């Protein structure tokens, strides 16, 4: 009888062990954690890409607004009549770009005047390596001249590996160019 009891007892142990294994494999209480771990990295990559793209678009819009607003000083002749220098004009722009930009060191201003719109020819702000060319001029023109004002800024891209399409310049930056073209008023 002791042998039978031992077999029954051993079988129960084996059956109990098999039942525990089955319960373990059927248990789904940690399934959500595993699913989240698998989805978290791609989700964070997409989220970071969206945030970085939105910031770049917003910075471009802020720069374009600054170009439009500062161009009015040249359009109306205020800059020419007051003898405003290139540095003074840049400082007036920087007064409006205080939050998002490192204006004094990163902003380049290019102002060129032409006789008419068909003669407008602008050099690229960057060379083939993606660095700034720094061949900018300050020529606000005379009454009736066509003037093109360009503000150039290299915006740093922090998620360059995640969003390679945003980088278009050297050192993981995107060159933002805001342009305003107009004919000076007869001041």
Image (cartoon, rainbow, N blue to C red):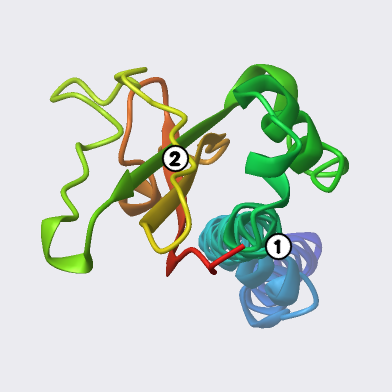
Q: Is 83 on the left or on the right of 43, as rendered?
A: right
Residue drawn at the location 62% of the way across and 71% of the way down: 35
Within 10 Å of disc 2 (Cα), the crowding (few <14, some 14-19, many 20+) is many
* Element on which disc 1 rests: helix
Instruction: Mark yes or no: residue 162 visible.
Output: no
| Most foreground residue, 97 or 68 | 68
Residue drawn at the location 73% of the way across and 37% of the way down: 101
Residue 5, above or below 121? below
Circles 2, 1 touching at the beta carbon (< 8 Å): no
| Most foreground residue, 170 or 115 | 115
* Element on which disc 2 rests: strand
Residue drawn at the location 53% of the way across and 59% of the way down: 49
Where is residue 1? Give x, y as percent: 79, 68
Residue 73, above or below 86? below
Residue at image mark 2: 111
> How far apart are the two marked residues, 2 and 1, measured between alpha carbons?
14 Å
Residue drawn at the location 44% of the way across and 45% of the way down: 141
Q: Earlier in the sequence, mark 2 or mark 1?
A: 1
Which image quadrant for residue 115?
bottom left
Q: Quadrant of the C terminus?
A: bottom right
Residue at image mark 1: 69
Where is residue 23? Give x, y as percent: 72, 78
């Amino acid at each position: 009888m002791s042998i039978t009891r031992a077999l029954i007892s051993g079988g129960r142990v084996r059956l109990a062990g098999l039942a525990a294994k089955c319960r373990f494999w059927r248990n789904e209480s940690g399934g959500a954690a595993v699913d989240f771990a698998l989805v978290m990295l791609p989700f964070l990559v997409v989220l970071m890409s969206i945030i970085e793209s939105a910031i770049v678009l917003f910075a471009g819009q802020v720069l374009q607004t600054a170009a439009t607003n500062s161009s009015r000083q040249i359009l109306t002749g205020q800059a020419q009549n007051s003898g405003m220098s290139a540095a003074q004009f840049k400082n007036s722009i920087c007064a409006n770009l205080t939050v998002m930009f490192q204006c004094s060191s990163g902003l380049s201003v290019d102002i060129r005047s032409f006789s008419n719109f068909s003669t407008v020819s602008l050099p690229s702000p960057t060379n083939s390596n993606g660095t700034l060319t720094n061949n900018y001029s300050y020529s606000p023109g005379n009454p009736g001249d066509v003037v093109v004002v360009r503000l150039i800024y290299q915006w740093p891209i922090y998620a360059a590996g995640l969003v390679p399409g945003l980088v278009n310049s050297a050192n993981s930056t995107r060159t933002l160019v805001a342009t305003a073209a107009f004919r000076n008023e007869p001041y």
